[in-house]
Amino acid sequence: MSQLDTRKLEILRKMGIDVWSFRDPLHNRKSEPESAVSAKTETSQSEFGQSVSGVSEAEQLKTPELDGVSVSITDLTLDTIADRIRSCHNCGLSRTRNHVVPGHGSAVADWVFVGEAPGREEDIQGLPFVGSSGKMLDSMIAALGVDRAAVFITNGVKCRPPENRAPFPEEISQCSRYLKQQLEVIKPKVIVTLGCSSAHLLLDSEEPLRNLRQIIHSYGERQIPLIATYHPAHLLRDPGDKLDVWEDLLLARSLAES
């Protein structure tokens, strides 16, 4: 057995079936000497692990539409967007939801994770990724050495589709403005899309997800780096793809730290 295969087996043993592990979190990496950070980064990659800029003058002149109401980009906040989402009735999902799920996390996040749509638990609590998929995502983020409270987590569609079906194209289209406005406010260093629909939405692509992985895409006028990977729910069904997802997360981390 090759050294590479042995290392991969060691990684998978440490992962277990549904647990991501990381020996040396990088929470304090900025306070450590550069040589120590470099050595620790190499260790994390081999063992399994990985602010907002000012508003430009051109952006200040933009007036994005929020349900037909023009709002200056300088007045746009995550709270403003969340209020609009709560009052949104642009598609049929508004009639079947319990709660909207605008998103949760830091308004100055370096990382934004974008899923597809809320599930049952998310619909009940009004928060993204709180069910079994949420626990998987928590493990993924912790393995990167990143504090979940310091990222922003949301979905392309803000209301639960009945019976957890995939969102219809018209639902994605009606809801997409809110996600794009959230990204404009946060201005993250990297976006990680989780699943097909969020990747297709932000990349304006219909390519299979396997063709979008391990590529540094860019989103919007700011050319924000974007990495596409599998949804945590996919990993619950097929844990054999965890190593692929970890490779995607390592690529995203290299962008967030650059």
Image: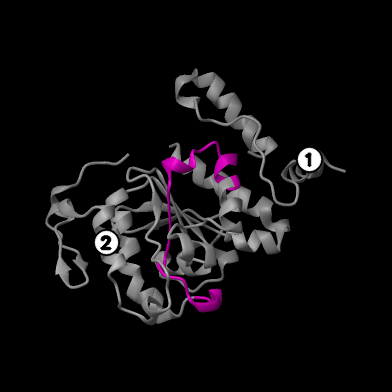
Residue 115 visible? The answer is no
- x, y (%) of residue 101? 40, 62
Q: Is residue 173 above or below residue 42?
A: below
Q: Is residue 139 above or below residue 232?
A: above
Q: Residue at x 15, y 59 (%)?
A: 62
The residue under label 1 is which amino acid type? Glu
Residue 121 visible? The answer is yes
- x, y (%) of residue 239? 71, 57
Towards the viewer: 2 or 144 = 144
Rendering quarter of residue 65: bottom left
Towards the viewer: 20 or 102 = 102
Q: Residue at x 32, y 59 (%)?
A: 220
Residue 83 is labelled as: 2
**Residue at numbered disc 1:** 10
Element carrying mark 2: helix
N-terminal-most mark, 1 or 2: 1
Seen from this angle, which residue lies furthest top? 33
Is 154 part of what is drawn in magenta?
Answer: yes
Is 190 part of what is drawn in magenta?
Answer: no
- Considering the image in quadrants, where does the N terminus appear? top right
Q: Residue at x 32, y 39 (%)?
A: 51
Element carrying mark 1: helix
The residue under label 2 is which amino acid type? Asp
- x, y (%) of residue 87? 27, 69
- x, y (%) of residue 127? 44, 57
Magenta span of residues = 139-166
